Amino acid sequence: MSPTSTSPPRRFIALGLEGSANKLGVGLIAHFSDNSPAQILSNLRDTFISPPGEGFLPKDTAKHHRAWIVPLIKRTLKESGVKVKDIDVICYTKGPGMGAPLQSVAVVARTLSKLWDKPIVGVNHCVGHIEMGREITGAQNPVVLYVSGGNTQVIAYAEQKYRIFGEALDIAVGNCLDRFARTLNIPNDPAPGYNIEQLAKSGKVLLELPYTVKGMDCSFSGILAYIDQLATQLAPSSDADSTTKSKQERKPLLDPATNNPITPADLCFSLQETVFGMLVEITERAMAHVGSSQVLIVGGVGCNERLQEMMGEMARERGGSVYATDERFCIDNGIMIAHAGLLAWRTGFETKFEDTTCTQRFRTDEVHVAWRD
Amino acid sequence: MSAFPHVLTVNIPLPSPRLATILSESLSVDEELSPHVHRTFETDGSTLVVRYSATTARMLRVSTNGVFESIKTLLETFQELDEPL
């Protein structure tokens, strides 16, 4: 008897569109019915970078996304070789995020859905990060630390929901870092947090900053206010202008141990050590609560190697380990939206056309995680 | 005297009724943000008819400028990404 030939697994392809903050991402992903690993067909991104000392405003960010979205989608199709007829579903970020940027992407997703006659799925941005982290790292059931410019949450999965165990009560940790970068006039290219991380590497003095863990949650706005204040007391740099004359009359901030002036690098170092220590604490608290020893870090701040190092030390002490992805996936991208959207669509989920709106607030635990047990 | 005295009607010709309908449907999903502005989208054959009325001239200007930016991107989408039938 000739061996029966097994037919090849069915391939599902999703287009993902992300634009909740200043990163515009377009991704194309393939899933297979035999559950072999997902295949990344394309993952393109263009970031709207504001000048040093400035953040990105919704109106300008939306303008950037509108200018780049069609060229990026065109390039995605061209480089991947995927034909429109092979795409099964269009996925877009429903929220959370900034209103105008979200809408600038959603309206194109809707249009493609009608032009190409494809179903559409609205995706929760946080769930996108979590699912991409799980897929890339293979982490089984970790506690997830989701940290970015817009979000700070400690998450654990239970009974088809990603439950929030702890979070930032005021501003996200990434927002604290980004705003301090503006205070110091550090460039936003490629990202303010990245430049703070590099500057912190040459910091030597650990200053005592407010440490604001509140049970399972934490707060960052007080630390930011405090360190912004310290930054005004830095010794003037060589290119001081007339506004720093009054600072010269005040004694600059000195290291009590050596009497050397405190540098911006010292402030960056102190800020990172403090806020990352807080994140490690609330993550560990959640791990103790659920009895897990694995940590998965997702979100743009998850690229930070010092955070990964500190989290790794804690996880190893508990007999576990930390999982993290590289900048292709921890920074906002379209592939995570395609991935999470395709997972949902394959369970039969679809967003009705009239419901393809965006929302600035979209809690991680509002999503029914039907694709997991 | 109408509460929304500042009115603008814009007729946008599209290459086909299909594209005019898609444009109208895609733009209609997002609700108008301001209570000072009323907006409707309709199609008349291949033409998209956009009607705005607002309480002040400034609100009329702001809202119509906003929708034009979206329309520009969607026209680009039609041009670059529509599949031949």
Image: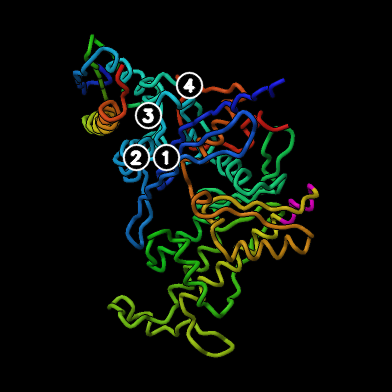
Q: Is residue A320 left or right of residue A350?
A: right
Q: Is residue A202 left or right of residue A348?
A: left
Tell me the distance, in whole angstroms, between the alpha carbons under discs 2 and 4.
Answer: 22 Å
Q: Is residue B30 above or below residue A302?
A: above
Mark 4 is surrounded, within 10 Å at the Cα level, by few (under 14), some (14 to 19) or many (20 or more) other residues, namely: many
Mark 2: secondary structure: helix
Q: Which residue is mark 3?
A: A107
Q: Amino acid at mark 4?
A: Pro
**Sequence-first tag of 2 and 1:** 1
**Residue sitting nearer the eye, A145 or A240:** A145
Q: Give the numbered dot on residue A119.
A: 4
Magenta stretch? Answer: A284-290
Tell me the distance, in whole angstroms, between the alpha carbons under discs 2 and 3.
Answer: 19 Å
**Residue sitting nearer the eye, B84 or A147:** B84
Tell me the distance, in whole angstroms, between the alpha carbons under discs 3 and 4.
Answer: 14 Å
**Label 2 and label 4 in one chain:** yes
